[in-house]
Image (tube, helix red, strand yellow):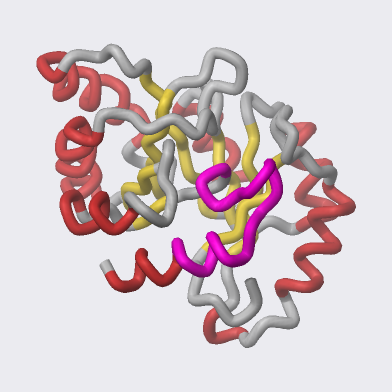
Amino acid sequence: MINLPIDYIGVVFAESRRQIDARKAAELRAVLMDWNASYRPKLTGVFVNPSITELEGVMEVAHLDVIQLHGQESPEFCGLVKQRFGTEVFKALSFPKDETAAEVNDTAKKALDPYQNVVDAILLDTYDPLYGGGSGKTFAWDRIPAYAEWAIQHGIALFVAGGLHPDNVEQLIQTYAPDGVDVSSGVESDGVKDIAKITAFVERVKQA
């Protein structure tokens, strides 16, 4: 991925087939630090319901730039993470696919208001009963505006994940203009990251 104009690279510490440990993350960070500083992506650690002790163990070794929380982490926990580590904190919000349109505005406000002073970005994803988020499933995009409106009002970035791939990301961005998009399985072939798909995805994001 060297030389691709990307902003964040995620390393997964949550239970997953993509899971790595802090030592491997440190090795990857060393490669990242060799990139040209003008476009060096931020190293982002993905966690699901971690303890502060777990985060401390990772941060001592890997020195993450962003901590992305994908579980049921409370606003109080997010604030503690931000204060303790001085990193950016992204909070993923995963919701079931069967939420009705009438429920979206109310759900968005209730879910988001407590996080307004303790996170740098919110990330919309589809609920996965095993991992919380990261399901690779597309959610109903028409829910995005309610969350986007809240994010704009509070000066917080809005990222979208869930079922994105090179063939649909342009439509998403052109229609809803999120601040960022998050992809994983959508740029894989047989469960392995595919540089051709990654390159195509990045190109279409920038075109959009």
Q: Nearer the viewer, residue 13 or 52?
A: 13
Residue 69 picture location, percent across and down = 55, 35
Q: Nearer the viewer, residue 178 or 88?
A: 178
Residue 79 picture location, percent across and down = 50, 37
Residue 170 picture location, percent across and down = 29, 58
Determine which quarter of the picture holds residue 124.
top left
Q: Is residue 30 left or right of residue 164?
A: right
For the point 45% across and 35% down, which residue is it?
92
Determine which quarter of the picture holds residue 14.
top right
Residue 87 among those drawn in magenta: no
For the point 21% across and 25% down, which residue is it?
109
Q: Which residues are magenta?
A: 185-201
For the point 46% across and 66% down, which residue is it?
200
Q: Is residue 60 left or right of residue 103?
A: right
Q: Nearer the viewer, residue 23 or 54?
A: 23
Q: Quadrant of the N terminus?
A: bottom right
Q: How many marks?
A: 0
Residue 188 among those drawn in magenta: yes
Q: Is residue 73 above or below residue 9?
A: above
Q: Is residue 100 above or below residue 134?
A: above
Q: Nearer the viewer, residue 57 or 103?
A: 103
Q: Is residue 205 above or below residue 146?
A: below
Residue 118 picture location, percent across and down = 43, 40
Q: Quadrant of the C terminus?
A: bottom left
Residue extending furthest toward the right: 23
Residue extending furthest toward the front: 190
For the point 49% across and 23% down, which residue is it?
74
